[in-house]
Amino acid sequence: MSQSDPDQTSRLSLATIAVTAGRPPREPGAPVNPLISLNSTFVSRATPPPGQAAYARYDNPSHHGAEQVIGLLEGGSRSAVLFSSGMAAIDAAISLIPPGGRLVMPSHAYNGTIALAQELAATGRIALTLVGIDQTDQVRQALAGGPGLDPAAMLWIETPTNPLLEVADAAAFVTAARSVGALVAVDNTLATPVFQRPLEWGADLVVHSASKYFGGHSDLLAGAVVAANSEADTALRAFRRVHGATPSAMDVFLLLRGIRTLPLRMERIGASALTLARLLESHPAVERVRYPGLESDPAFTLAKSQMTGAGGIIAIEVHGGPAKADALAARTKLWVPATSLGGVESMLERRRRWPAESGDVPDNLLRLSVGLELPDDLWHDLDQGLR
């Protein structure tokens, strides 16, 4: 599968695609993995053929394998476009909004995404409407506009949201966005294509902080966007070229290596997260557990209808306020107090310690990113910290 074969790919599992796609042509003596091209420039021709590298900011042959695999995992008809970080990928996706166009975005999305949108709105580049992504009627109304308010140009869906784990009614929102001609962009970082594939809902763009689950080892920065049509794909590549948000060859090498085990890791992480969420739900020191895989969660039914798993992030609210939450983070021995997610190591943090976090996020909320450790060990570590 060094070259994309849509007919063959449609018959393969995600686990098989993750391992086999994006490799060099199978020829005697050829490397099994793509080579790392540590070059900034390449020998040129007067008229370079399509796909030939000229300058590393424009393209790098080291990127092609990872771009192909991510595109196939998301069920796209074209490769992903890689960026130097998740925020760079988000910036590129939002750039497709025409000047002055209105963006509808969850009020509880990742705080970096909201900060970028608010900055663009403050300069007049876009108009911004924040909504409760779990409030279907509110989202529909925001998309339609009204007196003095044009219909939306783009709907940004984050589902589940980070860190409150709200779930969007994706099918309803895509239909509503289509009715007003709005683009639909979905941040699929938390779920990954293992648990949901937004292009199948009719989304125009799927965005990832590839630093998280795709990389999986907390050792790289990268972002990715998969576009549903060639026009958007071309615009994204042009944005990367002009704005210089190109990932390094070494980061992409690590990214592709991480992707090879993505389905296996997500299966284990998802199962462990559900086990831990059920245990936490009955712990006397825990005020509330947010996890869409729990039957008690408000998003359970919707999540089950559009996701094949609830993912590896759990949010808990600890009795005793922020001081108790901070104390738990300090007492754990296995859980790493860190601000990222998606690595093989389990991590936790109190999100409101960041000034940019939404005031709607409870100040005693801890976000738990479940890793690959044995669930029993993770539970004992949490339990001793909570007690």
Image (tube, helix red, strand yellow):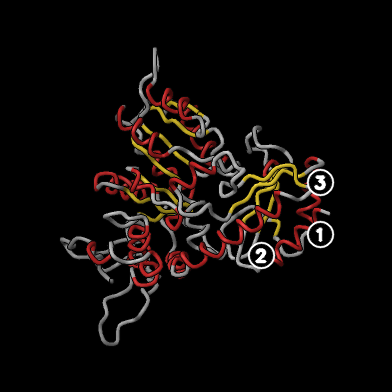
From the viewer's perspective, tell me whether residue 67 is left or right of residue 387. Answer: left
From the viewer's perspective, tell me whether residue 305 is left or right of residue 277. Answer: left
Q: Position of residue 120 (x, y in %)?
A: 46, 32
Q: First in sequence: mark 1 or mark 3? A: 3
Locate the C terminus and report the quarter of the image it occupies.
bottom right
Residue holding disc 3:
324
Q: First in sequence: mark 1 or mark 2? A: 2
From the viewer's perspective, tell me whether residue 224 is left or right of residue 369. Answer: left
Which secondary structure lies at badge 3?
helix
Which secondary structure lies at badge 1?
helix
Mark 1 against mark 3, which lies toward the viewer? 1
Q: In the figure, 146 relative to 276: above or below? A: above
From the viewer's perspective, tell me whether residue 47 is left or right of residue 68. Answer: left
Q: First in sequence: mark 3 or mark 2? A: 3
Q: Amino acid at mark 1?
A: Gln
Q: Position of residue 12 (x, y in %)?
A: 32, 66
Residue holding disc 2:
375
Q: In the figure, 255 relative to 102: above or below? A: below
Q: Residue at x 43, y 67 (%)?
A: 256
Disc sitting over residue 384 in the figure: 1
